[in-house]
Image (cartoon, coloured by chain):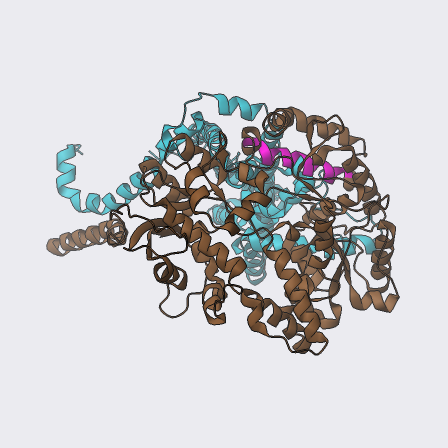
Chain colours: A cyan, B brown
Amino acid sequence: MKKKSFAETIKSQWQYYAMLLPGVVITFIFCYIPLYGVIIAFEDYNVSAGFSSPWVGLKNFTYLFSQPTFVRTIWNTLFISVWKLALGVVVPVTFAILLNEMRSNKLKRFYQTLIYIPNFLSWIIMAGVLMDILASDGAINMILHSLGFESVNFLGSASVFPWTMIISDIWKGFGYGTVVYLAALTGIDPGLYESAYMDGATRWQQIVKITIPLLMPTIILMTILSLGNVLNAGFDQIYNMYSPAVWETGDIIDTYVYRLGIVQAQYAVGAAVGLFKSLISAVLVIVSYVLADKLAGYRIL
Amino acid sequence: MRNVKWTAAIVLSIVMLLGIVGPFSLVKKPDTSSAGFISEAVEPPEDIWAPYDETVVITTMVEENSGTSFQGSDDYQNNPWYQAYKDRFNIDLRNKWVSNDYGTKLNLAIADADLADVFYVDSSRLTTLYKAGLIMNLDDVFERYASDTLKSYWEENKDTWETGCFDGSLYGIPQMNYGIIDQFKYIWIRQDWMQECGFDAPETMDDVIEIATTFAEKYGGYALPDNQNLDIFFKVALSWGANPGIWVEQEDGTLGYGSIQPQMKEALAQYAEWYKEGIINSNFTTMDSDKMFQDMINGNCGVIAFDHWFSYNPMPDLLTNLGPEAIFYPYEIPTQDGSPVKAGIPFNNGGYVVISSQCKNPEAAMKIINFFCYMMDDAVEGGESTEFIYSLYDNNYPNIVRGTRVINPMTDYNQYIQIKDAVDRYLAGEEVDTSELGKNVSKFNSCVNWVENQDVNGVGDWIQQGNDRSTYGIAKKYVDNEQYVKDAMWGAQTPTLQQAGSTLNDILIEGFTKIIIGDQPVDYFDTIVEQWLTAGGSQATAEVNETYN
């Protein structure tokens, strides 16, 4: 087919471009124009001078990295989000396979719905629920006590807190991942299982030799696409549940920026952290798309 | 068919574009009728209370306050205050604008150098305006036109007044506050439990702990609450003579931050011990103020160290839930060595009234301020009618003139004396003539309402002023005996504190929490102080010493 020239394309499809226009305009106004605001990351910003505040170059960045309380947030962020990323693949895949193996369709649907429900509740609500359940006199500690275990300070102990965050996040979100993987599983040709069965393969062998290999492209794709989010360890979740007692291990970049930028009105330093984070994330997004193209054959353009 | 598609596309695009443009075109045009007029200089009369011969127009900028409940057709431009300026002085005060985002709007106005004649600013903007030469030197106009009442505030609060001066000249008139009498802290104890257990008023901190632990054993819950900001700890620490949160003079004469003084370490050691013994709520690190209060409302705890406003929040909710006999009364915080407890009084000034250097009639602005002071302090003596006083004070109407008022820092102190006397006479069965109470009559009425009807909305005023054991009763003694330490940083924060203040406080809160919950030994305090100093604390200390010592 002969490639149409730009003018021809416009002429024959201008209606579509016209409908696209408002979206583009809105994106430009609200996403691109405000970008010039990043210059305050390089200024000694004060409100009365506005954007013409004195230029200080990288001073805000050096100040930031000289703060031990900031440097640790990077490590905390990576620790929490990498674990969330890893478990966020393993747990849904496991559940998807288990559900897929179930004979009763009714039960399958029931469980699928059940594990999907927490995904729809916002963290502000979940935080309230979790803080009650995990309190020292809450349900979980009551159970631990009756089984003869020491009670655990899930939200107040610096060594336990990150795991509480990781596990509660997986618990809340794995229903969604499970549904995605279940959809991928239904795409596997049942003929494969039938012939494997004829050859005498056990259930376990079928899972290891057929299901997992065929699920791999989806797994790789989902993992790679979430790479860009590795610096987002979950502000809503952690902000609603953390406290000074667990800052050492639970303070992530976003909560730090919030305290610095909003609570303390340090706009310049706050903008510097935001810019730093965005740059790293941008690199990660690009890398992840290259990887997605190479490893899973997934490309947008 | 093709036409239909085209039409649909065009219509859709137009609708969507309108969606973007629409909100902008709907933005209300500023009301140009009240802005942009020119005020002429008018010859002022000799007597500072006399009206002008011809109407003087001056302008102001107004901060919206949702607490103000306008009656009838009143608004920020037409209200009893503005009417009174017109009637008494022939001054027409006009609002250049009214905004609920006063700070931002003011920044824009400063950037445009488009200021009203008289308005209020905070300390950092005061400096900005002074440096930009946009505000007037008030020495002469204050000397000539300030009323005796206003001048008496100046005489009695010279240290605060200085914060509005540059090179010895007055540029911003400090607006003050209702007084240091509301800055003190108390131990609050639940009365029905106290009586059942037969306790007397606590005289030492050990007494307090005994009362609290007995309550916990007998009625369940825990002995002492706290929250993740350690709000309660910082009050309990007063018992050790610590001054958390303010700057104090140290033994060597230099100024140091109260939260890192050795007394804090002693207080922490004891507090950590209490936590270990299960006296402090084991979940305090996950609780914010609201949650902590919610627990108290549910009756989980009968002792707390807190500010005077505990009787306003959460007390009414607490009594609604637990019944009026669960009332908490305030007690003095006992000290370790039996010496008088000294509360730290932070610098607390409501802002500064400034007059634009373009203002043609600065004396008119002074008259407006004078009038507020007069209504506040001398209205009853001046023979003003009760209705008139009400019309200015009810429904939080003093908020309307937020930007052009100066408050007598003895207001609450004097009010307490008046109310306590009136309530005592009322309880003794005497007739109380409420017209002599002026603007304070609503306090009196709510005390009576609590006594007669157990109306929980009155309990706050009752415990603050009406009761024999009242917060202001205790605080008056503190004020009279000068049992307080004023913040050595009496004025604006230094640059480092403005920039890193909350990061510095975060270091302390995090470290103290670790000590309290036993993650770190008490000696970790020294490490925290070290961290605090390196993170900007030593820089801040140097600045504070330079500016204020």
Figure check: A263 above or below B527: below
Secondary structure mainly formed by the magenta segment? helix
Q: Which range is magenta? A: B499-515
Figure check: A249 above or below B63: above
- From the viewer's side, name the closer residue of B178 and B296: B178
- From the viewer's side, name the closer residue of B499 and B300: B499
- From the viewer's side, name the closer residue of B100 and B380: B380
Q: Quadrant of residue B537?
A: top right
- From the viewer's side, name the closer residue of A23 and B443: B443
Figure check: B320 above or below A55: below
Name the image quarter holding the N terminus of chain A.
top left
**Location of residue B103 in the rendering, given as x and y in whole percent from the top left corner:** 43, 44
Instruction: Decide if residue B357 is on the left or right side of residue B223.
Output: left
Q: Residue at x 51, y 24 (%)?
A: A61
**Location of residue B491 in the rendering, given as x and y in whole percent from the top left corner:** 56, 37
Figure check: A228 above or below B72: above
Q: Is residue B504 magenta?
A: yes
**Location of residue B19 in the rendering, given as x and y in whole percent from the top left corner:** 26, 52
Instruction: Decide if residue A111 is on the left or right side of residue A272.
Output: right
| Residue B302 seen in render | yes
Specify the farthest residue to the front: B46
Q: Quadrant of residue B264?
A: top right
Q: Is residue A259 magenta?
A: no
**Location of residue B63 in the rendering, given as x and y in whole percent from the top left corner:** 42, 51
Q: Residue at x 53, y 60 (%)?
A: B378
| Residue B176 seen in render | no
Name the image quarter holding the C terminus of chain A.
top left
Q: Residue at x 87, y 59 (%)?
A: B214
Q: How many marks?
A: 0
